[in-house]
Amino acid sequence: MRRIYEPEAYRTPAICWWRDTAPPATQPTLEGDHRTEVAIIGGGFTGLNAAIALAAAGVETIVIDAEQPGWGASGRNGGFCCLGGSKLGSTLLAHRFGNDQRMEWHRAERAAVDHVDALLSDNRIDADRHSNGETLLAHTPKAMQEILSSTSENGAIYGAAPDVIPAEDLRQHGLGGNFHGAVTLPIGFALNPAKYHAGLARTAQARGVRLFGQTPAVSITQSGRTWRIATPTGTITAGKVILATNGYSSEDIPDWLRARYIPVQSTIIVTRPITESEQLRQGWTSLQMCYDSRILLHYFRLMPNGRFLFGMRGGLRATAGAEAALARKIRADFHRLFPEWRDVDITHEWSGLLCLMRSLTPFAGPVPDHPGLFAAMGYHGNGVAMGSYLGAQLADIVLGRKQSGPFPVFLSSPPARFPLGSMRRLLLAPAYTAATLFDR
């Protein structure tokens, strides 16, 4: 198994708030030889959603994970179930793919949020959901002007009325901080991703899906019309295989994946419960999930138990020195935006990997020249909704049936490789430097 980050990036975080609230179930290790109709490599949101959809169609399915299901991005993210999944803006989408495809993408974004909403309701998954949509906060006056210029268009695209909040009204909306205005689009909600994942695992197993942990795929080969997945303690023979490993993928499982994605670090801290008086002093009492207008954005929210979650992009390495520098940086950013909470203890901190594609759009479809092999990946930091949705949509593709929801055709276009191969992380350094200068 060849991965491009240091080993620490692929270890289960020792301190993660989500794991405290919903300790993951221990799934057995696959042993011996097994046969199934579909095998799924990766037990996160994408893999489990695909498994649930396949099981609903009566298809026998096995899901394996290198660690325990949910150990990767699905158990480390900020819990924002919201619009997104592509790094291309609406104008660029139209320029590259045409207006019809642009609108189909925006319908898919909305459908992805609705998909998770329905999963939670239909399967009675209590995931501590809160927040009426998502709030974008301007980090400069210029950014607020740019936000205002696109507000009406975004409302029309998504069929929802945005709520514009001038800078002087932020505190009365419970959004007090170093910001210059905001806009809320009432689509989406926040949740506890570990509780959501646990609910997905229970739902999948109730429908007959076999789940295995501590079962890395060490090779995947095709013979005739069947695939053989070798693990350290067994094998799986399947008619079809789904790759659902996203930013935790390996360069050689299979070789096709090599250089077709870039894992990108994101870091999160969680505070102790912040008292009501402390919230009032800062002027932040809202349970809205929020992000700011920086390219290297911050994302944050007050959770129902009073703890505050704060995350940021920007890490390039997973060494001890790099992690220490990230720890200093995220605290400095947190204290700058919320100065009244400078003395509030931070109890949890962890990092995870999101996944970028060269096209800046996700991929979900058949792997070229590999009959019976499929993949879904590349949600650009918005995998709670889009990763879940594309897992279910990929099940339709595997079954050879019409898509059950909006699905722009560009999503199934094979992803191109990045330059520099295993050294492609070097591409991020100048991009981060430029973003930092632009964000000032």
Image (spheres, rainbow, N blue to C red):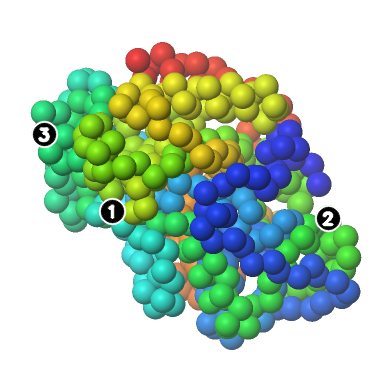
Residue 363: x and y in percent read: 54, 51
Residue depth check, mark 2 versus mark 3: number of the one nearer the observer? 3
Total numbered labels: 3
> Is 20 or 219 nearer to us in this picture?
20
| Residue 154 visible in the snapshot | no
Q: Secondary structure at mark 3?
A: helix
Residue appearing at x 34%, y 37% in the figure:
291
Q: Residues within 10 Å of mark 1 (few under 14, many from 20)?
A: many
Hey, what amino acid is under mark 1?
Ser
Residue 394: x and y in percent read: 54, 65
Q: Earlier in the sequence, mark 1 or mark 3?
A: 1
Give me the disc on residue 218: 2
Hey, what amino acid is under mark 3?
Asp
Q: Secondary structure at mark 1?
A: loop
| Residue 348 visible in the snapshot | yes
Q: Earlier in the sequence, mark 2 or mark 1?
A: 1
Residue 404: x and y in percent read: 42, 72
> Is 324 or 142 nearer to us in this picture?
324
Tell me which corner region of the image, top left, top right, bottom left or bottom right, holds residue 149. top left
As drawn, the residue found furthest toward the bottom would be 58
Give me the disc on residue 169: 3
Q: Compared to 241, does 176 lie above or below?
A: above
